[in-house]
Image (spheres, helix red, strand yellow):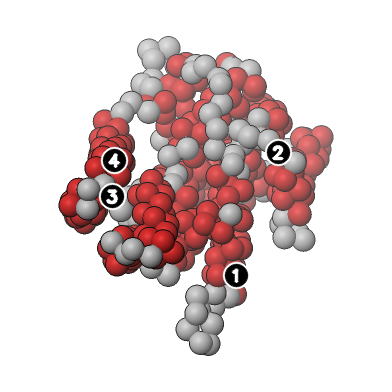
């Protein structure tokens, strides 16, 4: 478990390249020793190096491959042909996987990219359960691409460059929320607005059953937004929203949500905002190093437990794609900006 925590959090105090260089130096230093204990140190360094390479994500570039190939050459010189073969295959496999992933991110047809059909559908044309399932498929597609190190890096310096998949996921959340607001406010007829409001309430109930807390909160944020909440809604619907809001009540550090998450089995899509909030709190509230210069690993241990709980939820949902619903979503691009939503709300209720 200690090694897992180290591999998850080492980037907070050393870069991947620096760690690899140190492990290479350690292996080189002890690999030709005759003393069994010192020989074991080289084997340990090699084993950890394999794990580090296996966990690499955005850092895997040609420069790093060249650095790692130095070890392949050394292994061959030392007569360790099998180790050289294993390590070379691992490095190339990881590099090619990274390159393929970059290509897919450029060219792959995402679920969200379904084009609008000639027959236009509305949210009311589909059952709430069906809509919730398709929202969950879209969320899962993005959630599963997030590399765990991205989350830790973002909580420390908010670097979108080094957290590309996390950035896409959070942008998706915001677009979905604005899209929900837009679908309600684009109706001038109060009865039609109420229909959409009720439909979103029903969708939220199904999202909860699917353990999709991310979309759940995106819809909740829309219904609780000022342009929506200031309008008049039937009492039973307002009370229903109030009840659904209790799950993400911020009092007592989101106790209800944390309890629900603890009782949830994968697949699950947690609300990423609270994960980032917890990691940021740990980062700000604890020093990276002690006064003597030693690394504060107790801080990394706390970070690891948060990230490990997120990792265990990363599983696929077994729903079939519904092209009509996905086309209706249109990647949630059809939304009105926040300022305009507020202006529409004031027109509907001066």
Q: Quadrant of residue 332?
A: top left
Name the mark nearer the viewer: 3 or 2: 3
Residue at 28% x, 61% y: name it: 32
Q: CA distance from mark 3 to mark 2?
A: 34 Å
Q: CA distance from mark 4 to mark 2?
A: 43 Å
Q: CA distance from mark 1 to mark 4?
A: 38 Å
Q: Nearer the viewer, mark 4 or mark 3?
A: 4
SS state under label 3? loop
Kindly tell me whether residue 171 is visible in this rendering: no
Q: Which residue is mark 2?
A: 264
> In front here: 125 or 112?
112
The residue nearer to you, when weighing 238 against 82, is: 82
Residue nearer the viewer, 293 or 12 = 293
Q: Residues within 10 Å of mark 4 (few under 14, many from 20)?
A: few
Helix, strand, or loop for circle 2? loop
Locate residue 28 relative to residue 62 in the image: left or right: right
| Residue denoted by label 3 | 60
Instruction: Return the residue at label 1.
Output: 298
Dot 4 corresponds to which residue? 82
Tell me the CA gap for discs 1 and 2.
Answer: 27 Å
- Image coords of residue 335 (percent x, y): 45, 38
Q: Residue at x 65, y 22 (%)?
A: 129
């Amino acid at each position: 478990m200690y090694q897992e925590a180290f591999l998850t959090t080492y980037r907070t105090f050393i870069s991947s390249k620096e760690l690899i260089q140190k492990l290479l130096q350690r292996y080189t230093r002890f690999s030709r020793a005759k003393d069994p204990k010192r020989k074991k140190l080289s084997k340990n360094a090699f084993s950890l190096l394999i794990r580090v390479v296996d966990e690499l994500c955005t850092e895997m570039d040609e420069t790093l491959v060249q650095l790692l190939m130095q070890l392949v050459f050394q292994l061959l010189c030392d007569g360790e042909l099998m180790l050289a073969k294993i390590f070379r295959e691992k490095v190339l496999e990881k590099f090619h996987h990274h390159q393929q992933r970059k290509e897919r991110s450029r060219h792959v047809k995402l679920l969200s990219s379904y084009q609008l059909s000639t027959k236009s559908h509305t949210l009311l044309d589909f059952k709430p359960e069906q809509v919730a399932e398709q929202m969950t498929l879209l969320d899962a597609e993005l959630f599963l691409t997030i590399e765990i190190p991205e989350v830790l890096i973002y909580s420390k310096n908010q670097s979108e460059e080094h957290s590309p998949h996390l950035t896409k996921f959070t942008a998706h959340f915001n677009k979905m929320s604005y899209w929900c607001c837009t679908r309600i406010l684009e109706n001038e007829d109060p009865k039609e607005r109420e229909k959409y409001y009720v439909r979103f309430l029903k969708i939220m109930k199904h999202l909860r059953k699917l353990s999709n807390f991310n979309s759940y909160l995106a819809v909740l944020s829309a219904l609780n937004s000022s342009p929506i909440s200031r309008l008049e809604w039937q009492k039973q619907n307002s009370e229903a929203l109030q009840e659904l809001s209790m799950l993400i009540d911020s009092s007592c550090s989101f106790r209800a949500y944390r309890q629900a998450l603890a009782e949830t089995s994968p697949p699950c899509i947690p609300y990423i905002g609270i994960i980032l909030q917890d990691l940021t709190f740990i980062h700000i509230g604890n020093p990276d190093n002690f006064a003597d210069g030693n690394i504060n690993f107790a801080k990394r241990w706390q970070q690891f437990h948060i990230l490990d709980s997120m990792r265990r939820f990363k599983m696929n949902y077994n729903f079939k794609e519904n092209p009509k619903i996905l086309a209706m979503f249109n990647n949630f691009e059809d939304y009105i900006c926040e300022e305009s939503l507020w202006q529409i709300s004031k027109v509907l209720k001066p």
